[in-house]
Image (tube, helix red, strand yellow):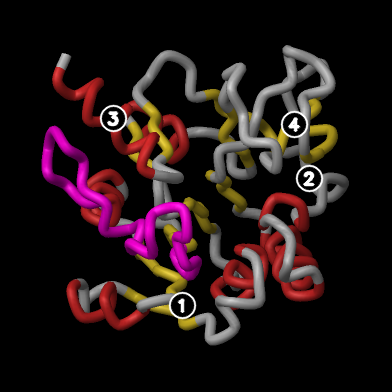
Amino acid sequence: MSPLRVIVLAAGEGLQLDGFTKALIRHPGTGEAVIEQYQRLFAGHELTIVVGYRAIELMHRYPRLHYVYNHNWRLTGNAYSLALALDERPSLVLSSDLFLAEAIARRLLDGPPNLVLTRQRENRPQNGLNLKLNADGTLARVYRGTPESPHDPEAPGIFKISDPTLLRLWKRGASDHGNLFALETLPLDREPLHTVDVGDDFFHEVNGPADYLALMEATRR
């Protein structure tokens, strides 16, 4: 398996977390921060962090990682952050607020060259992204809001793209529409975009205190 660039989108202000830097959230059971988890799960791959709000906090703690600075972090979405970091090298893109099982990381690394991680759950954010899939499991359409069908999975924010032309087009689209979510700017008609599902493996997103409390309670069981 050829090395990937692992790009972590961490420029946001984290308003729902009282301004706490998401990548520094520690798992209540293991004590491992999100960024340390990514270092472990994707060892051997180049880790690049797109920073913005409180950027020095991450850079000072982890000076050996690669960084891209989004000075417009307050005015742009994660698509713009992604555009700053992308080039033509195969890349795995992740949000900075996720805890995931090693099995999921392995499926991402070993999976198809162009893929989107999916998840099935009933309780979804109103502004979240849902996916319409083709019969063969490839991605047909991305849309926001209420799921049109209970069979439509959501996109929790992890993508792997390897095709150089697709990466160039994604960078251009993300730059032109920097206020959108990164996935909304990914061309769907260039190469088949396969999906890999979270399944029953551990996957937890920390958007706010309630999410972290749920993780704390699950760890105690």
Q: Who comes first in sequence, dot 3 or dot 4?
A: 4
- SS at circle 2: loop
Circle on res. 52: 1
Q: CA distance from mark 2 to mark 4?
A: 16 Å
The range drawn in magenta is 10-33
The residue shown at (81%, 74%) is 176
Q: Who comes first in sequence, dot 3 or dot 2?
A: 2
Task: Specify whether 217 is left or right of 186.
Answer: left
Q: CA distance from mark 3 to mark 4?
A: 26 Å
Q: Which residue is mark 4?
A: 131
Was residue 5 drawn as part of the magenta stretch in this picture?
Answer: no
Are the two marked residues, 3 and 4, in contact with CB atoms closer than 8 angstroms?
Answer: no
Q: What percent of the width, then of the height, locates residue 79?
A: 66, 64
What type is the residue that disc 3 sits on? Leu
Work out whether residue 30 or residue 196 is closer to the camera in this orientation and state it: 30
Q: What percent of the width, then of the height, locates residue 181?
A: 68, 55
Question: In the figure, 38 relative to 204: above or below?
Answer: below
Mark 1 nearby-residue class (10 Å; few <14, some 14–19, many ≥20): many
What type is the residue that disc 4 sits on? Leu
Q: Where, quadrant-wise, is the C terminus in this rendering? A: top left
Mark 4 nearby-residue class (10 Å; few <14, some 14–19, many ≥20): many
The residue shown at (42%, 38%) is 205
Q: Is label 4 or label 1 in front? A: 1
Mark 3 nearby-residue class (10 Å; few <14, some 14–19, many ≥20): some
Task: Specify whether 138 is left or right of 2.
Answer: right
Q: Which residue is mark 3?
A: 215
Q: Quarter of the image holding residue 64?
A: bottom left
Q: Is residue 7 visible?
A: no
Q: What percent of the width, then of the height, locates residue 220?
A: 14, 20
